[in-house]
Amino acid sequence: MDPHILVVEDEDALSTLLQYNLEKEGYQVSVAGDGEEALMLADEATPDLVLVDWMLPKLSGIEVCRRLRNRPETRNVPIIMLTARGEEADRIRGLDTGADDYVVKPFSMTELFARIRAVMRRIRPGLADDKVTHGDIVIDRVAHRVRRGDQEVHLGPTEFRLLDYLIQHPGRVFSREQLLDAVWGSDVYVEVRTVDVHIGRLRKALNVTGSQTDPIRTVRSAGYSLDAK
Ligand code: CA
């Protein structure tokens, strides 16, 4: 599943811009307009990374950091602080804010994406790699493309997320319910049989030449796994 980023920013124009660009980059994004909402959203679904503005109404960005660090579920979630140019950045440098990195406004999206990838790579290596290889299968998360050997594999968005999820845990067997939660989201009502349909499509698509081995294992009455090679 795409890494989930929680954006905490009270300037609507900036949070809209961030959401648009992060989603285009393949992240799943939720937006909070103040610190209290941020803590509420982080409670509902633990994010993989938090982007938090220093100057926020109700709770400051520093306070949001502190509280996220005090909760067991979010203790290790990487946090990047957004600050205005000037003294805030200097203060952050010298302060134990709990943030893993900070970016000074105005920043370019390219700069921000580089920081996000660097922080994620450091903390959650499996999530942040642009390219993941498993046997002869290569997923390019930036270009949203999959190759098998030297052939391009054409996948729909759901099959892409399924493969991306399975490839993070080769050899591990997932029940249909687990795959539904991870790939479709736990708040969506989908019949478990839907998983079988999409696994079927994924298998078919991965057999590019028509004579390739099937990398997905069906485990009777348990679920599916990607063969560990
Ligand atoms: Ca602000």
Image (cartoon, rainbow, N blue to C red):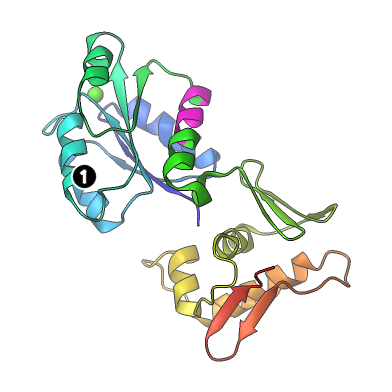
Residue at coordinates 35% horizontally, 41% vertically from top-left? 78
Quadrant containing ligand 1 reads: top left
Q: Foreground residue, 139 or 177?
A: 139
Indicate whether 63 appears above or below 84. Answer: below
Residue at coordinates 45% horizontally, 40% vertically from top-left? 122
Query: Residue 6 at x, y = what percent?
Result: 34, 43
Query: Residue 178 at x, y = what percent?
Result: 45, 74
Indicate whether 71 appears above or below 25. Answer: below
Provide the residue designation for mark 1. Answer: 68
Boundaries of the magenta span:
110-116
Residue furthest toward the bottom?
A: 221
Indicate whether 123 appears above or below 52. Answer: below
Quarter of the image holding residue 156?
bottom right
Query: Residue 91 at x, y = what percent?
Result: 21, 16
Residue at coordinates 18% horizontally, 30% vertically from top-left? 62
Classify mark 1 as within 8 Å of ligand 1 or not, answering yes or no: no
Judged left or right of residue 223, residue 90 is left
Query: Residue 143 at x, y = what percent?
Result: 66, 42
Asked if residue 183 is among those painted magenta in the image, a careful observer would answer no
